[in-house]
Amino acid sequence: MLLIPERPGNRRADSMLNLMAEPVIGLIFFVPGIEETLRISGRATVIDDDAQLADLAVRGKAPKLGIRVDVERVFFHCAKALKRSGLWNPDVQVPRDAFPSPGQVIRDQRRPQDSAEALDALVIEDQENNLY
């Protein structure tokens, strides 16, 4: 059994709603610099049990929800795919400015009346002040 805390994020409950409708879950674990991965699949349950979630507190704040995963399969993957991808190779990483900023994406998807720069500032402020 795994227990995954629901941490503050984009303030949307899409994943939780999806799991309540279809409780099948798949997870893949990456560790920066390590090319082997671990894949886990199983059945998920959304929980709000304070006693179970208390151990997952960060900076004194316990999550309000969690995802309990009853593990059915565990796969260890060799490094071939990540070696081919160059995921951890800094020489082939895409420069950040090659993609739109978070503010540009938010503006284009949901808030055309706002400037991308103002939305980027809100994203940075949120990341600095609301992670936990």
Image (cartoon, rainbow, N blue to C red):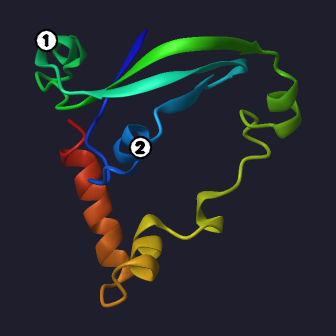
Horizontal side of 2 relative to 122 (left or right) equals right
Where is residue 91? Give x, y as percent. Answer: 78, 43
Query: Hey, which residue is sitting farthest bottom in the picture?
Result: 113
Q: State which quadrant residue 54 falls in.
A: top left
Residue appearing at x 37%, y 39% in the figure? 20
| Quadrant position of the C terminus in the picture | top left
Q: Is the residue marked by circle 1 packed among few (<14), some (14-19), or many (20+) residues within 10 Å?
A: few
What element does badge 2 sit on? helix
How far apart marks 1 and 2 lie (CA) works out to: 25 Å
Q: State which quadrant residue 12 falls in.
A: bottom left
26 over 99 or under it: above or below: above
Query: Hey, which residue is sitting farthest front in the picture?
Result: 21
Where is residue 42? Give x, y as percent. Answer: 54, 20
Where is residue 122? Give x, y as percent. Answer: 26, 65
80 over 117 or under it: above or below: above
127 over 56 or under it: above or below: below
**Viewer-nearest residue: 92 or 66:** 66
Identify residue for label 1. 51
Residue appearing at x 24%, y 17% in the figure? 56
Residue appearing at x 32%, y 72% in the figure? 119
What element does badge 1 sit on? helix
Residue appearing at x 43%, y 45% in the figure? 18
Disc nearest the viewer among 1 and 2:
2
| Quadrant position of the N terminus in the picture | top left
Identify residue for label 2. 21
Where is residue 103? Give x, y as percent. Answer: 40, 71
**Viewer-nearest residue: 20 or 101:** 20
**Viewer-nearest residue: 131 or 73:** 73
Dot label at residue 80: none
> Residue flagged by tag 2: what amino acid is it?
Ala
